[in-house]
Amino acid sequence: MKNLLLTKSMLALLVAAPLFSACKDDSEDPKPDADNEQITTVTYTLTPQGGGTPVSIQYRDPDGDGSTPATITPATLTLAPNTTYTGTLTLLDETKTPAENITAEIQEEGDEHLFVFAPAGVNLTITATDKDKNNLPIGLATQAVTGTANATSTTGSLKIMLRHQPGTKNGTATPGDTDVEVTFPTAVR
Amino acid sequence: MLFRVPGAPEAAWRWLMAILLLGVGLPAWAQPSCTLTISGRVADHESQAALPGATIVVLETQQATQSDVDGHYHLQLCAGTYHLQVRFVGYAPETADLRLTSSAERDFRLHPDAVMLRGAVVRGERMAAPTTQTTATITGQELQQTRGQALGEALQRVSGVAAIQTGPGIFKPMIHGLHSNRVTILNNGVRQEGQQWGVEHGPEIDPFIASRLTVVKGAASVRYGSDAIGGVVLVEPKPLRDSAGIGGELNLVGMSNNGLGAVSGTLDGNLRKLPALSWRAQGTFRKAGTMRAPGYYLKNSGFEEHNMAGAVGWRKDTYGVEVFYSQFNTRIGILPAAHAGNQSDLLLAVGRDRPLETTGFSYVIDRAYQQVRHDIGKLTGFVRTGNAGRLQLTLSQQLDFRDEYDKSRPRNDSRAAAGKPELSYTNRTTTGELLWEHKPWHQFTGSIGLAGTYQANRYADGSRQFIPFYTNQIAGAFVVEKWQQGRWLLEGGLRLDYRDLAVRRGDRDSTGVFFVERSRFRYATPAASLGATFDPSTHLTLSLTTGLTRRAPAANERFSDGVHNGMYELGNDLVPGNAPLTPETALNVGITATWHNNPRFNGELTLYQNRIAGFIYQVPLLPLVQTIRGAHISWQYLQTDATFRGLDLSSSYQLAPQWLLGLKGSVVRTRDTRADEWQILMPADRAEATVRYDWPNANATSRFQNRYAQLGGVAVARQTRVPNNYEARDLLLPPPGYGLLNMELGGTLRWGGQPLEISVAGANLLNQRYRDYLNRYRYFTDEMGRNVTLRLRVSF
């Protein structure tokens, strides 16, 4: 009879087993990843120094990595030949509400960050005009100088990289990790 | 013909077949005079009383017999030199050298063993391996030869088992071309449940816990759950001590290549005053530094592991209870080359002779790394219900914590200071199984079982989503019956599982607004198996197994999305334009011939075919997925129909009394029958040959016994059976084939009365540079160079 009792209690245990584990928080929903930093939006705005209408180009991936791919608007950054522009970069995390201003953070930790501008196939020279506390360039503020126009129907590119170099920044691109790498189609016309 | 695959003639397969036929042919003409008899009587040394039921084993041939009621025994052998070992409970075992030229008589007088006599009770412990199914075990000295290796690495000794590798620390077992969700691992009787979906997640198991590793090749879904369509790995510790006293063992391992050091100790005991109570405690520490490929060190390839386990059991003849707890902790460095920052850097890193970044030797594990903890608590009990049979209940609770740290630390200083992982997962699984083994009825034996699983998978707030929240509930019932008569054994089983997968996935719409998408998948997944075993002679066993199984897709196969360990992965249901996954249906057939207890040739040959309708697999996703951080090696899940056909061979040939030749090989051919092309990422043809010399144990007083030397070679072909137009579908073609030379020397030293097993093994002795198609690092680096391993084991 003892055995029968044992059997019954075992059966009861088996049935009850999942209940031990089914905690209340199992019905919770995933939350937006508030602590996980993302950069969703990079805007580069260029204002002609002699006056004129500013031009800008934007990389935007509001849903973060994966899913809907990022968009670049307008499709091409078009600059006038032989012109000097003042450039400013703004970076946002639009997955947070309100959108988090990454530009200010980078400014604050300027001694750990470096923007690298790599134009290709276009007559464009970009130099950083801002400095961190160690007198090394950051690149949030820039000067862009264009040369002669692109050959008809050719478009070059401008790659903008943000290197994160905590404790290792020396003014070159080599140390650290890449936090941002976006490539904008660019032409001088 | 069962084994016919469209395509070019298969040289490797023919070659294996030829060797096999040669092997089978050999004993026919190499049987000179195997009719010599050795006989005698086993008795107590003092009283001269007969010892009925003593075991007599010929160590060389593993022929065994038992003494009859008068203590007499009788064996038939070929002419040669043998070691005869005699064992009887409560007596010290005795070994005798025997040079047999004509029939001979040899009597044994055994000495009572003072220690063993103390209330030793022999209890038969049945191991629940399915009998008609092809199984392979690694135990004893063979297991000892794998000490210090990861579980998946050790299992590669079994023909038909490969490993998907992610660098030197992560090995995922692959049976007959199937892995991850399709291979069930039973860790001490508990279904291992964690983040096992990931190809770069090694099983969270300390292999030092095992005294035996068993691989069930082919579907074993009826007994172990409907997703075990590739096979099952059983990690079995030694049963709890059943004789009074305290014992234990200590293992030490050192490796030259990556400075790996491993210490593992086990203590077990049984109380004299409370013979029902037994306990065991075990602990392992394993740490490795930077791995060396020929010519350079592989950056950040170290790992560290510390584990512990304990068990307490109360056991009587009619009932027993056991509580078991184990904890596994590991930190594994991830190669930085896999984390290339952008597309051009990545393409520059792929296929290089050596990685751009190399390093010196170090034990430091830097970012990127994985930090994993796995806890298992188990309660198991049984009652023998008199005439009804045996009832067993197993309850377990598992917790799996997996944190993954990206190579780049958070850009924001306050977030970096918090030191949170970028991916942080928790998997909580409760399982229960009730098994009733009925009393044998006529020729029938069998069992009926109920099984349930509740699993919740979550990620921490602030962790990047990669696998969504999901809750998986499974309830199943199964019955397995065996019928045995004469030379025949038939086995049939049925199982029905009901699976309910509820998924909550956080996502953002194209404007970036967060929402939660809920989906639920409910399936009934049946499984059936039928098998037969026939013994045409005492030296040959033939078996046939068939099985039909349905496996429900797992959450990761549907919904993985994001970057993890530097690679981007995408689930099938999220691929634009893909239909949602449907369950896989697998129909498999296998035949196995086993030659055993032969004086010279012993071996096993398995042929199998597995057709999987709706086969779910991962392929490289090209063009590479771009995120704001650049490009990543990318993978996506797809579904097709696939047919696997293959052959495993494992054999040995006793060349001369002291010389043993071993040969193993495996071949698998997988066709994607929907696209009519070869299936991607399947193991290449593999063959392994060894020659072993065992020194005769000249005299029993010698301090160095059981000496052996073994020389071996492993050959792996280039995988040429890949999907059409492969250049456009993967970043790199499969690497060329390779051959490795290995060697091992060992023996047992008498050291202050304790036997000290010692061995030195050299792997990749020629320091060959090679890459393996199934290693995810193959894009970036070579495999491990020369490695010398020293192993010590003391048991007391």
Image: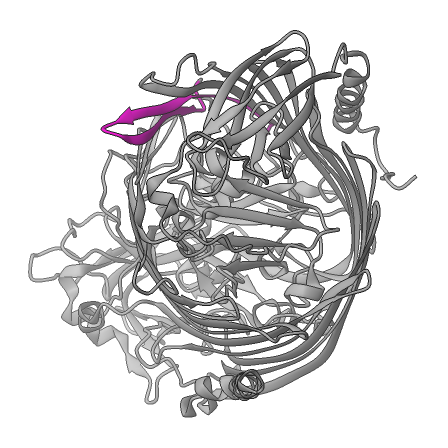
- Quarter of the image for residue B65 reads top right
- Quarter of the image for residue B298 reads top left
Q: Can residue B536 be found in the magenta stretch? A: no
Q: Nearer the viewer, residue B671 or B187?
A: B187
Q: What is the x, y in percent for residue A174?
A: 26, 46
Query: What's the magenta bit mostly, secondary-structure-wise?
Result: strand
Q: Is residue B232 above or below residue B664?
A: below
Camera sees residue B65: yes
Q: Identify the residue shown where x is 24% and y is 66%.
A: A140
Q: Which residues are magenta?
A: B736-765
Q: Is residue B527 above or below residue A157?
A: below
Q: What is the x, y in percent for residue B536?
A: 85, 37
Q: Identify the residue shown where x is 45% and y is 39%.
A: B780
In this picture, residue B572 sits left or right of residue B10: left
Residue reaching furthest to the right? B1
Q: Is residue B633 above or below residue A32?
A: above
Q: Nearer the viewer, residue B29 or B72?
A: B72
Camera sees residue B406: no
Q: Is residue B588 above or below residue B47?
A: below
Q: What is the x, y in percent for residue B289?
A: 28, 40
Q: Identify the residue shown where x is 73% and y is 65%.
A: B446
